[in-house]
C-alpha cells in the first residue's frame, strides 16, 4: 500500500529530485537507508558504542584518505593477486 504525501524541500534538493524519473522510488530508498542507519546506531548504542556525528565524520574522512592512497600500481597488484588466487583454487580442485 502507498500513501501520497506533500513535503517542502530546500530548492537544491527539489532541483536534484527533478532529475529523477521516479521521485517516489528515490525518496523511498533514501528513507529506507536512513532508517537502517538509525537502527544500526541504536544497536551499537545498546552494545556500548558511542556513535557521534563527529566520530562518523572522522571515520568518513579516514576512509577517504585511505581511498586516496590506492594507486594504479596497487590496483594492478590487487588484480594480479586475485588472478593468482583464482588460478590456485582452480588447480587445487583438479
Image (cartoon, helix red, strand yellow):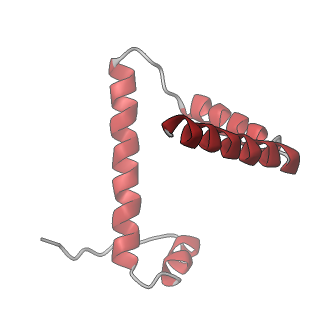
Q: Residue furthest front?
A: 94
Percent of width and height locating residue 60? 65, 39
Q: Quadrant of residue 22?
A: bottom left
Residue found 41% across the figure and 71% down from its top: 26
Percent of width and height locating residue 40? 37, 35
Q: Quadrant of the N terminus?
A: bottom left
Percent of width and height locating residue 92? 54, 34
Q: Is residue 72 left or right of residue 63?
A: right
Residue toward you, 64 or 56: 64
Q: Is residue 41 above or below residue 68?
A: above
Q: Is residue 15 above or below residue 68?
A: below
Residue found 60% across the figure and 43% down from its top: 86
Percent of width and height locating residue 29? 37, 63
Residue found 52% across the figure and 70% down from its top: 10
Q: Is residue 2 left or right of residue 46?
A: left
Q: Is residue 60 left or right of residue 53?
A: right
Number of callouts in the render?
Answer: 0
Residue found 41% across the figure and 60% down from its top: 30
Q: Residue furthest left?
A: 1
Q: Is residue 28 above or below residue 66?
A: below
Amino acid at each position: 500500500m502507498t500513501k501520497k504525501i506533500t513535503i517542502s524541500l530546500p530548492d537544491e534538493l527539489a532541483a536534484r529530485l527533478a532529475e529523477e524519473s521516479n521521485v517516489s522510488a528515490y525518496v523511498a530508498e533514501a528513507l529506507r537507508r536512513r532508517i537502517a542507519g538509525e537502527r544500526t546506531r541504536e544497536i551499537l548504542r545498546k552494545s556500548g558504542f558511542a556513535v557521534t556525528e563527529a566520530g562518523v565524520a572522522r571515520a568518513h574522512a579516514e576512509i577517504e584518505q585511505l581511498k586516496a592512497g590506492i594507486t594504479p600500481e596497487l590496483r594492478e597488484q590487487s588484480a594480479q593477486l586475485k588472478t593468482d588466487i583464482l588460478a590456485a583454487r582452480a588447480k587445487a580442485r583438479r
